[in-house]
Image (spheres, rainbow, N blue to C red):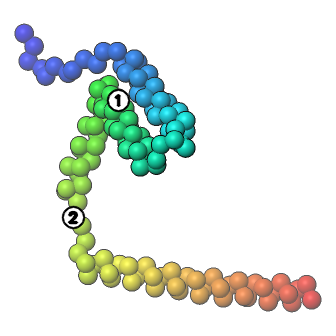
Amino acid sequence: MSTGVDSPEYKLDGLKWLLVLAIIAAGTVGNSYYAEDIGLLYRVVAMVAMGLVAAFVALQTAKGAAFWELLKSAQIEMRKVVWPSKPETNQTTLLVLVVVFVMAIILWALDALFGKIASFIIG
């Protein structure tokens, strides 16, 4: 009797990935083949639908399930982030702009100085 949590078995992962590649290839070939016959809107809708089907099939694999768990845990971590307030954001943005402006002035002055030195040496 096992007390651990049973992990799902992922069978035929290679075949599923081949199916994903076949769906993507069929969408790409179909999009280029019907470029002049079918309107852009219908081709975009078809490509989005095929992309969703390919994503669904890919999520049924072990790597797809691991990627989905990564996305869910990233979303949980994003909820934990303490975002800055509007005044903090404005203050930080203003500070960055001032530092960039000061550095631009310093680099412009150094460029002008080295240009004068080079023209003095060259004659």
Q: Residues within 10 Å of mark 1 (few under 14, many from 20)?
A: many
Judge whether residue 64 can be spotted in this image: no
Per the image, label 2 sits on a secondary structure element best described as loop
Q: Residues within 10 Å of mark 2 (few under 14, many from 20)?
A: few
Extreme-right residue of the structure: 123
Which residue sits at x=35%, y=38%? 49
Which residue sits at x=72%, y=88%? 112
The mark closer to the camera, 2 or 1, is 1
Per the image, label 1 sits on a secondary structure element best described as helix
| Residue type at the position of mark 2 | Val
Q: Mark 2 and 1 residues: CB-CB less than 8 Å, in contact? A: no
Q: Looking at the image, tell me whether mark 2 or mark 1 is earlier in sequence order.
A: 1
Which residue sits at x=79%, y=89%? 116
Q: CA distance from mark 2 to mark 1?
A: 33 Å
Residue 61 % position (x, y): 32, 25
Residue 74 % position (x, y): 27, 47
Residue 84 % position (x, y): 25, 71
Give the quadrant of residue 111.
Answer: bottom right
Which residue sits at x=23%, y=60%? 81
Residue placed under numbered mark 1 in the picture: 58
The C terminus appears in which quarter of the rendering?
A: bottom right
| Residue type at the position of mark 1 | Ala
Residue placed under numbered mark 2 in the picture: 82
Of 34 and 51, nearer the camera is: 34
Of 5 and 21, nearer the camera is: 21
Of 6 and 13, nearer the camera is: 13
